[in-house]
Image (spheres, rainbow, N blue to C red):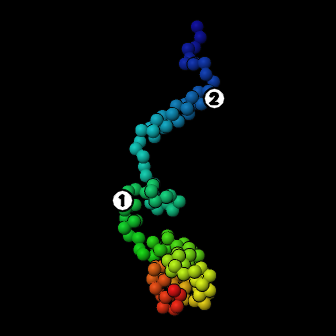
Amino acid sequence: MGKKSAHTGESPKDRSINIMDKFISKNINRDKNQPFKSGIRKDANLPIHLWPLKDQIEYWETRSDTDRFNESYPAYSYWIAEVQQQSKVHPSFFTAQALKLKTMLQEMFDACTDPKEAVRELRKHGVY
């Protein structure tokens, strides 16, 4: 009689594919049962709502007035539109006066002045 071998009828390629499939399915099942891991705070590409709750609370509590201003008014045009709306002055008159006071308005925006405060300052300069 011949030599006995443990031949299963699979080619080496099929056997390696089956082993890899088993490994992949084992990892998928393991990851499926893991609790959801929230994002890493240091990642700038990750939205804030995916940060761990502790980091979200810390972020919202430690924001400065400048941060809030920059979030509300990312550009000068947003800020000046809000100032114009709160001043309740006719748009053409406001635009004419704003051109005269352009440098002052730009300085107020750079200093992160609240629109209400800017309206009060403009009233001192005759924009009302």
Upstream in the sequence, badge 1 or badge 2? Answer: 2
1 vs 2, front mark:
1
Q: What residue is at 57 percent from the left and 14 percent from the top?
A: 3
Q: Which residue is mark 2?
A: 13
Whole-percent x, y for residue 18 in the image = 57, 28
Closest to the observer, 104 or 71: 104
The correct choice, above or below, for 103 with respect to 29 in the image is: below
Q: What residue is at 62 percent from the left and 27 percent from the top?
A: 14
Mark 1: secondary structure: helix
- Distance between mark 1 and mark 2 Cα atoms: 50 Å
Q: Is residue 32 visible?
A: yes
Q: Could you classify mark 2 by the number of other residues whose Cα lies within 10 Å: few (under 14), some (14-19), or many (20 or more)?
A: few
Mark 2: secondary structure: helix
Left/right of residue 111 with respect to residue 77 in the rendered view: left
Q: Which mark is residue 74?
A: none
The correct choice, above or below, for 32 with respect to 82 in the image is: above
The correct choice, above or below, for 98 with respect to 61 in the image is: below
Whole-percent x, y for residue 93 in the image = 60, 84
Q: Kindly give the residue lying farthest to the top in the view shown.
A: 1
Q: Amino acid at mark 2?
A: Lys
Whole-percent x, y for residue 117 in the image = 45, 83
Q: Which residue is mark 1?
A: 54
Whole-percent x, y for residue 82 in the image = 52, 75
Q: What residue is at 42 percent from the left and 46 percent from the top?
A: 36
